[in-house]
Image (cartoon, grey):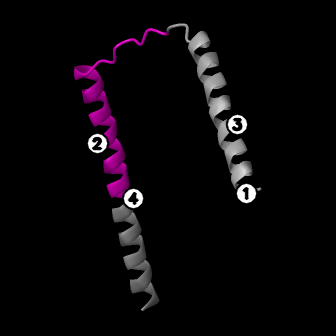
Amino acid sequence: MVFEALKFMVLGMGIVFLFLLLMIVLLTLQAKIIRKFFKEKEIVKTNTSTNTSANNKKTVAIISSAINQHIKDKG
């Protein structure tokens, strides 16, 4: 009885291991095929430091206004 349980356990774990191994191989193959036919375009990095600082100032102003409004409503 115990031997049969161990046999089923090894069989089940073996099938799961083989399935996972097959899945890894197929996904790796799929990634290679996709990279071959759909090459990524290079992204040109622009200088966004001025835009970021302007957006940060605007975000801080909006948050401050919301906090002040919330405090006014409670008080």
Q: Nearer the viewer, mark 4 or mark 1?
A: 1
Q: Is residue 12 magenta?
A: no
How crowded pointer 4 is (Cα within 10 Å; few <14, some 14-19, many 20+) is rated as few
* Label 3, label 1: how far apart the Cα atoms are: 16 Å
Gap between marks 4 and 1 measured at Cα: 60 Å
User: Closer to the N terminus: mark 4 or mark 2?
Assistant: 4
Q: What amino acid is labelled 4 in the image?
A: Phe
Q: Earlier in the sequence, mark 1 or mark 2?
A: 2
Query: The disc labelled 3 sits on which kind of residue?
Result: Ser
Q: Is residue 61 above or below residue 69?
A: above
Residue at image mark 3: 64
Question: Dots 2 and 3: beta carbons under 8 Å?
Answer: no
Nearest to the observer: residue 65 or residue 20: 65
First in sequence, mark 4 or 3: give its number.
4
The residue where tag 4 is placed is 17
In terms of secondary structure, where does tag 4 sit?
helix
Q: Which residue is mark 1?
A: 74
SS at badge 1: helix
Residue shown at 69%/50% (left/top)?
70
> Which region is colored magenta?
18-45
Q: Residue 64's x, y, as percent?
A: 70, 36
